[in-house]
Amino acid sequence: MRAVIIGNSAAGLAGAETLRRLKPEAEITIISDEPYPPYCRPLLTYLLGGDIQEKDLWLKARDYYQQWQFQPRLGRRVVQVDPAARTVALDNGESFTYDRLLVASGARPLRPGIPGENLPGVFTIRTLGEFQAMQNMLRPGLRVAVVGSGLVGIKTAQALAQAGYNVTLVARKAQVLSNLLDTSAAALLHDALKDIGVNLRFHAVPAALAEHHGRVTAVVLTDGSEIPADLVIFGIGVSPNTEFLAAAGLSDPRGLPVDDQLRIGPADIFAAGDCVCPRDRLTGQPAYFAIWPAAVAQGRLAGANLAGYERTYDGLLAQNTFAVGSTRIIAGGMVQAAEPSCEVHIDHDPKKRRYRRLVIQDGRLVGVILVGQVEDAGVYLSLINNKTPLASLPADPRRADFQVGRLLG
């Protein structure tokens, strides 16, 4: 059996390894547009801040492809997939025939489409190559504007501030992580960012990047004000890499729709990772959510189905874990109570920087935000994941004096 895997990161590697275990005789080709062996993309911000060294990025040993008997094609871009002929065409004219195909092509960072965004000194942070180019420009006293207040923007701002640079985090709305945190939790995060030296600018929408002698000098906002910057980093989101599927009628810029076996149309084509839009485990609706653990889980399931199994993906539970300084935050499920039927229960201690928000629907926990005291997060997420009726528990999580140990009787 010939399998082609497009993607050399979390989902692609998990799929390839699962397929190898289940089908030792399979011919497995892995294609990547990056020239590097597998590395951990989420660690790039830690590398930026000096917390790790480049050697810590690599996921696999030097002889990984040989050990697993994979045929790598690195530094090559897929330009077309032909489902009828079962072929994958590369940008150098090569073509591969497959019996089963896994699309794990990931996503690429967005730029806002404003004047000056391609100036020297303007970056995104998604690939090792771009990070290395950025690293070559870092120098003491550098002024950095990080545009985008999602997780990537926050982690990037944190890394650079802790490394001693003058950093401004530029947020379009009145708070950071507006899709993930409510105002109270965000306020605690704002304090944590200020503590490590990050300057915050809210209600700030970039209109252009100013330049002098061909180098970026400032972010110009729609209100006419400017944020001085020698380096600008965009962290405003990603777009799934699906264009090479356009001729096959399978491309979707919102993420590839998949069925319960992670197929994207033809029975022999599967997809996993940041290029797909699977269903949300709680709502049952399609939901795009790009995180490493989900990509690995999807890759493993898709790999098993490449091998001929019919395993079912039970959906994605949105969750995030991160820390800024000593402030830890975990959020999962439906953190914003959008439905009228939802109850919200809040415990807030601003002095201790502790916060707990529970979202309840139909007698079940469907969302949680924890700031500060996060040790019991696994229990809350398990209740959400298992859709456990709160009435069946020996203790009620909604009570302010609730302790996880009471669930044990």
Image: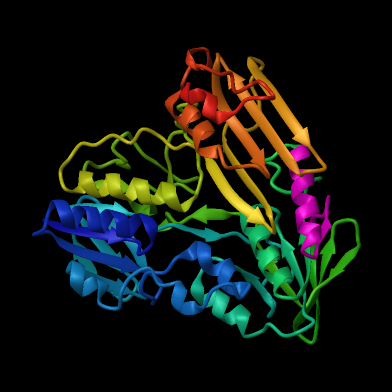
Question: Which quarter of the figure has residue 66?
Answer: bottom left
Residue 85 seen: no
Question: Dividing the image into 4 quarters, which one contains the N terminus?
Answer: bottom left
Q: Is residue 216 above or below residue 359?
A: below
Identify the magenta region.
183-206
- Residue 55 is left or right of residue 197, and the answer is left
Residue 199 percent location from the top left of the image: 82, 62
Question: Which quarter of the figure has residue 243?
Answer: bottom left
Display coloring: rainbow
Residue 146 seen: yes
Q: Is residue 323 magenta?
A: no
- Residue 120 is left or right of residue 207, and the answer is left
Q: Is residue 334 above or below residue 179?
A: above
Q: Is residue 186 magenta?
A: yes
Viewer-nearest residue: 82 or 404: 404
Q: Residue at x 70, y 77 (%)?
A: 119
Q: Is residue 281 above or below residue 372?
A: above
- Residue 92 is left or right of residue 278, and the answer is left
Viewer-nearest residue: 127 or 48: 48
Q: Is residue 373 above or below residue 220?
A: above
Q: Return the residue found at the far left.
A: 25
Q: Residue at x 53, y 41 (%)?
A: 319
Q: Residue at x 51, y 44 (%)?
A: 289
Q: Residue at x 79, y 87 (%)?
A: 213
Residue 333 percent location from the top left of the image: 55, 33
